[in-house]
Image (tube, grey):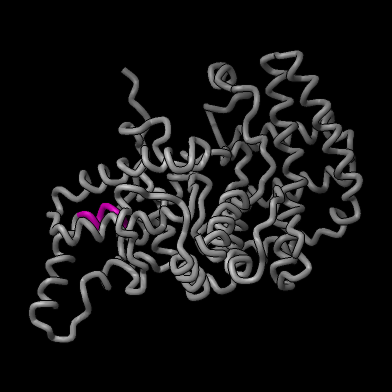
Amino acid sequence: KPMQPTLAWLDFNSAERERTQRVLALFEERDTRDELGLGGIRDSFADHFFPGTSTIQTRLRYLFFIPWIYQDLERRRTPSREVAARARKLELDLTEPLLQAHGADAGVFGRVARERLKRLPSSVYWAALRQYDICRYQGGREDFHRDFESLWRRRLRAKEENDGGRDALDYSWHPKLPTPPADFFQSPNFLLTTKEAEFFRHCLEARCPDSLLMFLAWRCKPAAVDFPWEHPELARFSEAHRELLEHARLFSETMHGAAILYNWMLAEAVPIKEKVSEYEDMFAAWAKEMVVAGARVRQWNLRRLWEIVRHPNHTVTVAAREFVETWVRLLLQHGVDLGRLEEGRRLVRNREMRLKGPRSRFNNRRALEQWGGAAGLGRISFRWGNANQFLSDLWEGLRGS
């Protein structure tokens, strides 16, 4: 009987474990399929712009729901052996009232899965709670559950002894975290109060001072655009942000062509005649866009790209750099003809085969048959959609709920 594939890592400390869990979580996120191994570059840009965000986050107020739930469990002196189950129930209990308050398209966790929900909001938002210093516990969520009882007992001892020690909530949560509404558990909603919105802005200012997210939270109204470089107030952004955005835009625009060609080649391999024609037309349209952007692409300083995109949480491999540089060179040399150029096709094919090995769709018929007709095709926006929803929620709170 063949062995089932597994993935494991050596557990040295909570920081390394949390970083590994963030990487593993990317495999479960919507619209993050990394067919050509460009995720390290994409996520480096995204963490420069919008630290703490992920593509499976929905609404900003979950950053308050989660600590409020755990604070309630602390007040109830919940033992560590029970906290995970109780917290799960309280998180799932939010689903129905949130759906009633906002509807099915409002970003409610558990809308479909309900009690079968695998990734709870607390799991999805835990890294963000740490990033923004809302959660001050130095460890992962599972570690927090294990230490839960000792934390609230520590708070009670400090209170009883009145020795000037910090309240136990200070060990777990930001001391200025706003208190929940009196009817929170009965009637939760996504509308931030002004106090909550101001608190979040100050968290960004303290923990993410150089991020685009912080700048937008303090300086700009939300903008209904598809990409951050389309923001109507781009001219007000700092020089550093504008430079980073220009590199991100060029990366997004040029690599979109490689994703189209990858799907075009898969359509030919199946074969699906209609899909072949669809991707051929799509590639031609993309190539025409690149003709318009030709001067910007020719002036693109790729050496500067690798300097500016560097981020401590992500690794950009030499192979990924070489793929990007070769693709851009071929684009500048061949333009619209790149889609039929054997060198370009070989570049894409070899990249996918190197990444997936025996699971490559070019070599594995079963893997090819599991292709759904489009893979990794969306233009990279670096989590702008999720960040912009946060900013919209924030703005509504600042205007007064």
> Is 79 left or right of 104, judged from the image as shown?
left
Q: Is residue 83 above or below residue 353?
A: below
Q: Is residue 167 visible?
A: yes
Q: Taken as a whole, is the magenta stretch helix, strand or loop?
A: helix
Towards the viewer: 381 or 3: 381
Q: Is residue 271 above or below residue 217?
A: above
Towards the viewer: 198 or 205: 198
> Is 248 left or right of 383, judged from the image as shown?
right
Q: Residue furthest bottom?
A: 164
Q: Position of residue 202 (x, y in %)?
A: 49, 73
Towards the viewer: 386 or 186: 186
Residues in magenta? 140-145
Q: What residue do we see at 65% from left, 71% from top? A: 219
Q: Position of residue 275 (x, y in %)?
A: 73, 19
Q: What residue do we see at 49% from left, 35% from top? A: 104
Towards the viewer: 361 or 128: 128
Q: What residue do we see at 77% from left, 46% from top? A: 254
Q: Is residue 247 above or below residue 372?
A: below
